[in-house]
Image (spheres, rainbow, N blue to C red):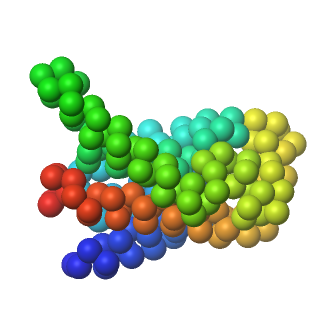
Amino acid sequence: MTKSEMIEKAVQEAKNAQIQDDICARSVLVGLSKVFDKIPEDMVTASMSLAGGTGSASGSCGAYCSGLLAVGLYYNATVEQERANPELKQIGGSKFHEYRQRFVKEMGTVMCPEIHEKVLGRTYRLDDDAEHEAFLSLPGHEVKCAEVVGVAARIAAEMILEGAVSAEE
């Protein structure tokens, strides 16, 4: 598969997972895991806790957070490696800053409610039961959120393929 095909497959799998399951954070990693073997099933499972602005707290976008985790998996050094060579921490740090900049360039923010405003026309506080229910009841929100999921998955896939040593799997 070419890099372009890998990116497209990751994006489509992520968007499909979002439309089917309506869990933005997990959907990003579902899509990426279909292309990148290094993403473990346990990480995909655990990522559900990041949905809804991290734990439905209306904080940082869950899709953004999961893409960031995937980039970190490929670029961050282990604790032992960093202790032996502290300069390695800068590589991971520069990559998470780059991921954030690329995501913000496209979405305008990393904050879940602000992304809702952009793609759904209003903010939703997912830590408020009534607001959360209104969000879940909004027809087509899964499809609109799938676009955000696609952005997060695409940026992560691009960055993984741009040069992480362990991307050659």
Residue 21 visible: no
Which residue occupies 35% across, 62% down? 157
Looking at the picture, how far across and down is residue 146, in whole percent? 59, 66
Looking at the picture, how far across and down is residue 73, in whole percent? 29, 44
Please state if 69 lies on the left or on the right of 92 as rendered: right
Which residue occupies 38% across, 68% down? 10
Please state if 86 lies on the left or on the right of 146 as rendered: left
Q: Residue placed farthest to the right in the image?
A: 130
Which residue occupies 52% across, 56% down? 103
Q: Front-most of 84 and 11? A: 84
Quadrant assignment, res 54: top right
Q: Quadrant of the N terminus?
A: bottom left
Quadrant assignment, res 46: top left
Residue 6 visible: yes
Looking at the picture, how far across and down is residue 48, in whole percent? 52, 43
> Against 96, is 21 above or below?
below
Please state if 23 lies on the left or on the right of 70 as rendered: right
